[in-house]
Amino acid sequence: MGAEREGDTRTRRGRKRATAYAACGVVLLAGCASMPDNGDLRGVESTPRQETQVRVFAMPPREDAPPSEIVQGFLEALTSDDPTFSTARQYLTPQAARTWQPEQSTTVLADGPEAEADRSGGRIEGGDFSFTLTGTRVATVDGQQSYSPADGNYGQIVHLVRDKKSEQWRIDALPQGVVMGTSDFERNYMSVNKYYFASTTTTVGSTRRPAAVADPVYVRERVDPTTQVVRSLLGGPTSWLRPVVRSSFPTGTELAKGVTALTPDDQNKLTVPLNDKAENVGHAKCDEMAAQLLFTLQSLTPIVEEVELRAGHTRLCSLSENRAATVAARGSEDHPGYLYFIDGDHRLARMSSGEDANPDPVPGALGDGTKALRSVAVAHDEHMAAGVTIDGKTLYVGSMVTGSSLGEPVLRSTGATESDRLTAPSWDGQGDLWVADRNPDAPRLLLLQKGGGTPVVVRTPSLDGRINAVRVAADGVRIALVVEKDGKQTLLIGRIERDQKPGEQQPSVSVQELRSATPELEQVTAVSWAGDSRLVVVGRESGGVEQVQYVQSDGSVPEAGTLPGLTEVQSIAASEDSEAPLFATSKNGLLWLPGGSGWRTLKETASAVFYPG
């Protein structure tokens, strides 16, 4: 369920197929199926992918179609490329067609919905009939287009009546939203990142600029996704992210009246006409608005290289891809200078991220072997590093400058065993350091501002279990936690909320609304951010083998999510810059995953590998 989709043909077992024909390389399916005249409905089953660029068109109800065919045709119409579901509404009574809101939600079932005739819910001879739609839930997409994993059984009633004048059967009561199988969802919808700004600012060198935060949503892939995602961006962030981000678009900003489609010109510039709410924005604010649009559109279609904003007949501003980086900081554009790892002598080493690179110990005390290290994190600017000693008891922070010393540890754990002490640390893009103390007598998630000072105890009101790993996104707004409970380790994504009241020396920091990003895995052993809303995870399902895969921060899985297998993984390293290669450590040492091939050994001794962050 990633951002790129392959189309698929519409096959339905046991049904007649609609005629398919090719025109300019696009396959058009004129209708989905012919329906049975009587009996129970067959499920609207998930369909295998075969052709790219497939378009699916729904068929209107047939004259004198029985109730089973009406319901079947309606379910098929939900999976078509009809932008307003106008054909699906033809299966409804006029009143039901007016009140049905397909945009309210999308329910994704493991297979297509099965429909069982309700023998006690009416009689065909009596002019009314009902069916129960059933299936196993996989996910829901709400009215804000936000994806959430789901489980359990689905059961909803569809009721039909026969019109007394026309004697045609139509649906008069049905659940709001749409329902479809997983394959239909993957063909119809695509994941896109909207971008907003963290409520706090990020300092890069001497420049302060807002951090762009990805807000993933699902849009219908073949129904003008560009216009859909722009409207969604203007509508504001999803509920989960809203407390910690802001939008630079003035309240009430929408596309100008009459704008129905947005298309870049032959210079790859997209002009976006806005309503009068945006007329009086200043130049700096307009640049931020354009950056939000440019980042969002490039997650959908990389060909957009420039965005121009207009309101009425006035050109507000224009922002190119090259200048966007000066307006906002974006994790995926933060190219790491080095790959870092802990070598066989328990020192911090680094190398350029290539097969022929020669590793060297980093300058400073963390690289000279003064302290044997178990885990290390390097700040995003690659000037500072934090290391946990091999026994897990102490955390040191030092600069990566030749001749620098460590000084006193910034944190100590009193856990009785190594597994009850400090996790690997993690830096956010604001220069703050995060680490968890796993001491069962005093488990804590801690924040050290700029890597030092009195640790801030981070509140985790919805946490149920013990933190085994911490990875903070570069934006400083989202955090990934591997949490252990009852022998299982799961990956949870939380929202970081900060509140610094005037006169207080320390901020109040909490992690809110933790949600699972790996509902199918029961053991997660390693994780790393691998994009603005994507992570790479090492784990296994119940009874399965260890696997390496990509997941989205909302819990969905990209289409090309599974990577070549690897066993006994100790750590995994991915960068939020998607062009940086993937590395891991295992019993075989330091490994590299070149594109399109299997894992290859670079060094026979290494215990942990990571990029800055």
Image: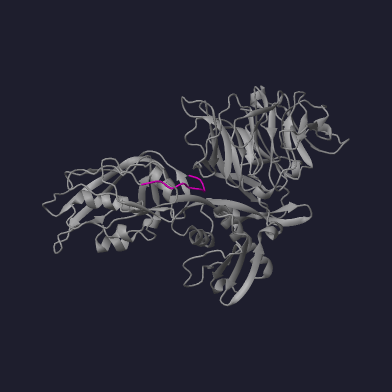
Question: On the picture, is 420 further left or further right than 74?
Answer: right
Q: How is the image coloured?
A: one colour
Magenta-colored stretch includes residue 262: no
Q: Is residue 413 above or below residue 177?
A: above
Q: Nearer the viewer, residue 85 or 54?
A: 54
**Where residue 135 sits: x, y (%)?**
33, 40
Q: Residue at x 56, y 76 (%)?
A: 312
Residue lying farthest to the bottom in this orientation:
313
Task: Determine the image quadrant of residue 602.
Answer: top right
**Where residue 574 sits: x, y (%)?**
64, 38
Q: Which residues are magenta?
A: 1-9
Q: Main secondary structure of the magenta part?
A: loop
Magenta-colored stretch includes residue 4: yes
On the question of residue 415 being in view, the answer is no
Q: Is residue 417 above or below residue 6?
A: above
Question: On the picture, is 452 further left or further right than 189?
Answer: right
**Where residue 509 sits: x, y (%)?**
64, 46
Q: Is residue 291 above or below residue 109?
A: below
Quarter of the image for the C terminus: give it. Answer: top right
Q: Nearer the viewer, residue 155 or 86?
A: 86
